[in-house]
């Protein structure tokens, strides 16, 4: 009888190991799909504040009211954003879907503004409280490097856009300075 006990325990342990392995394998696609990087979670929630845009051929900055609302997308790999910015005719609204492409380690952003859809892929660099998204783009019919910088401070989100014409100088285009909003 004592000879059967170690064999039965070994079989039981082996079966438990296989069961755990099969359970892990069956949940692997769900785990892999939820690879949203930590920095993206700053997009979740509601923020209100101001939008500042550089006026062309001037050092002046125009300031408007703004709101950003972000929710996780259904695939749990990104966020859906609604951005509302004050204009002369009320508020302009745009929608964006930020999805993490785990294979390329990039962010795919699909945006809808004035019934026009645009999709772009962004390189990501994240250090501390600041995340930088970079891509090739155009500005005033010139090829540029476009940079968005997201900075999460206590109770505040800052999001700005700058462009580089290739000379190493970054030119400010716009900025959101938003505080957390709670109903």
Image (cartoon, grey):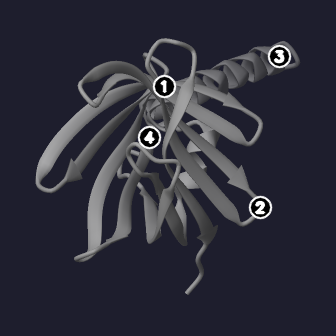
Please tell me which residue lies in front, 18 or 178. Answer: 178
Q: What residue is drawn where x is 43% and y is 18%?
A: 165
Q: Circle 2 — which element? A: loop
Give how far across and how far down residue 119 sits, in percent. Answer: 24, 34
Q: Quadrant of the N terminus?
A: top right
Q: CA distance from mark 4 to mark 1?
A: 19 Å
Q: CA distance from mark 1 to mark 3?
A: 60 Å
- Name the residue beneath numbered marker 1: 134
Name the mark on residue 78. none
Q: CA distance from mark 2 to mark 1?
A: 24 Å
Please tell me which residue lies in front, 81 or 64. Answer: 64
Q: What residue is drawn where x is 65% and y is 23%?
A: 17
- Name the residue beneath numbered marker 2: 154
Q: CA distance from mark 4 to mark 2?
A: 24 Å
Q: Give whichever of discs 3 and 2 has the lower sequence position.
A: 3
Going by the picture, which residue comes out furthest to the front?
Answer: 58
Q: CA distance from mark 4 to mark 3?
A: 46 Å
Q: Circle 3 — which element? A: helix
Going by the picture, which residue comes out furthest to the left?
Answer: 115
Q: Circle 1 — which element? A: strand
């Amino acid at each position: 009888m004592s000879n059967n006990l170690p064999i039965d325990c070994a079989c039981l342990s082996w079966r438990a190991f296989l069961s755990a392995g099969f359970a892990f394998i069956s949940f692997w696609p769900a785990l892999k799909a939820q690879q949203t990087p930590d920095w993206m979670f700053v997009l979740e929630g509601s923020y209100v504040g101001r939008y500042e845009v550089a006026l062309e051929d001037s050092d002046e900055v125009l300031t408007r009211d703004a709101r950003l609302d972000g929710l996780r997308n259904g695939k749990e790999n990104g966020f859906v954003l609604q951005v509302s910015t004050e204009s002369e005719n009320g508020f302009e609204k745009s929608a964006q879907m930020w999805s993490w492409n785990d294979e390329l380690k990039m962010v795919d952003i699909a945006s809808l503004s004035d019934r026009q859809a645009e999709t772009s892929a962004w390189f990501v660099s994240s250090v501390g409280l600041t995340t930088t998204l970079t891509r090739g783009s155009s500005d005033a019919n010139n090829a540029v490097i476009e940079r968005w910088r997201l900075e999460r401070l206590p109770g505040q989100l800052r999001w700005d856009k700058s462009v580089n014409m290739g000379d190493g100088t970054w030119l400010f285009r716009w900025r959101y300075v938003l505080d957390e909003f709670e109903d």
